Image (cartoon, rainbow, N blue to C red):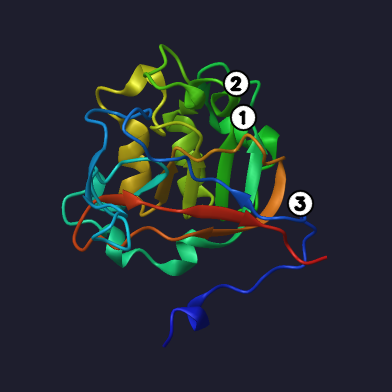
């Protein structure tokens, strides 16, 4: 069966946009990054002896807009190259959570209209604040454990946040949100730029680089309008 034939069908919902929205943040040596930043070297440059440019990059699997696969926190869990396409491609809902100060709870998700969605993206104040910095922010908005458990209990298969971690600031020692989501097989997208995405329903295309056997990978992602 081809990859295209595995894609879920479009729904008949109305999208709030008419043009694609690119969720990916640029990758460069000074970018916001958890740990070592990416570096590159030029292998070839255009000059009298070479007609083309070629660069070689050293990046981590969690660079830029990237997906965390279940194996990130679950030994023997699904790796990024084996994620089901129907988890990362299909109808999705952007939730307006810009009022949340630090930790998204189950009640926040319900109030924002998450019920019934299989793929959710959290638009928070990060998109215009913490995500725009080149250094780690002293505070950001993440998904709390109660929110993570609500997603699992309600059949969500994909969740995205607009910062370099899905975890809320108070939980980055034991990582309960990651553990809950990864154990249930929920795909996590981090560093999704949602500054230009209004709350509502879209068609998501998220295609992680298939690093064989690995726990994460950069994942170019776009939101497309749903057909009227």
Which numbered dot is residue 225? none
Q: Residue at x 29, y 28 (%)?
A: 34
Residue 152 position in % (x across, y down)? 46, 48
Q: Residue at x 67, y 41 (%)?
A: 197
Q: Residues within 10 Å of mark 3 (few under 14, many from 20)?
A: some
Q: Which residue is mark 3?
A: 17
First-in-chain label (2 vs 1): 2
Q: Nearer the viewer, residue 68 or 44?
A: 44
Q: Nearer the viewer, residue 179 or 161?
A: 161
Q: Which residue is mark 1?
A: 108
Image quarter where the N terminus lies is bottom left
Q: Residues within 10 Å of mark 2 (few under 14, many from 20)?
A: some
Q: Which residue is mark 2?
A: 100
Residue 144 drawn above or below residue 61: above
Tell me whether circle 2 and circle 1 mark residues in contact (CB < 8 Å): yes
Which mark's residue is nearer the viewer, 3 or 2? 3
Element under disc 3? loop
Q: Is residue 82 left or right of residue 97?
A: left
């Amino acid at each position: 069966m081809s990859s295209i034939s595995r894609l879920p069908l479009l729904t008949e919902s109305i999208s709030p946009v008419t043009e694609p929205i690119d969720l990916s943040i640029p990758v460069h040596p000074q970018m916001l990054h958890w740990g070592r930043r990416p570096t590159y070297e030029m292998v070839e440059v255009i000059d009298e002896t070479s007609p083309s440019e070629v660069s070689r990059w050293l990046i981590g699997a969690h660079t830029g807009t990237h997906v965390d696969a279940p194996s990130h926190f679950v030994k023997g869990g699904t790796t990024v190259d084996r994620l089901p396409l129907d988890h990362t491609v299909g109808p999705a809902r952007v939730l307006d959570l810009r009022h949340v100060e630090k930790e998204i709870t189950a009640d926040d998700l319900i109030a924002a209209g998450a019920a019934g969605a299989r793929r959710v993206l959290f638009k928070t104040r990060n998109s215009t604040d913490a995500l725009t910095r080149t250094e780690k922010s002293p505070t950001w908005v993440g998904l709390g454990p109660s929110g993570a458990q609500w997603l699992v209990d309600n059949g969500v298969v994909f969740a995205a946040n607009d910062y370099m971690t899905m975890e809320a600031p108070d939980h980055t020692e034991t990582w309960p949100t990651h553990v809950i989501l990864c154990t249930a097989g929920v795909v996590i997208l981090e560093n999704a730029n949602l500054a230009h995405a209004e709350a509502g329903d879209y068609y998501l295309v998220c295609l992680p680089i298939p690093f064989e056997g690995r726990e994460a990978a950069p994942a170019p992602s776009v939101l497309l309008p749903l057909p009227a």
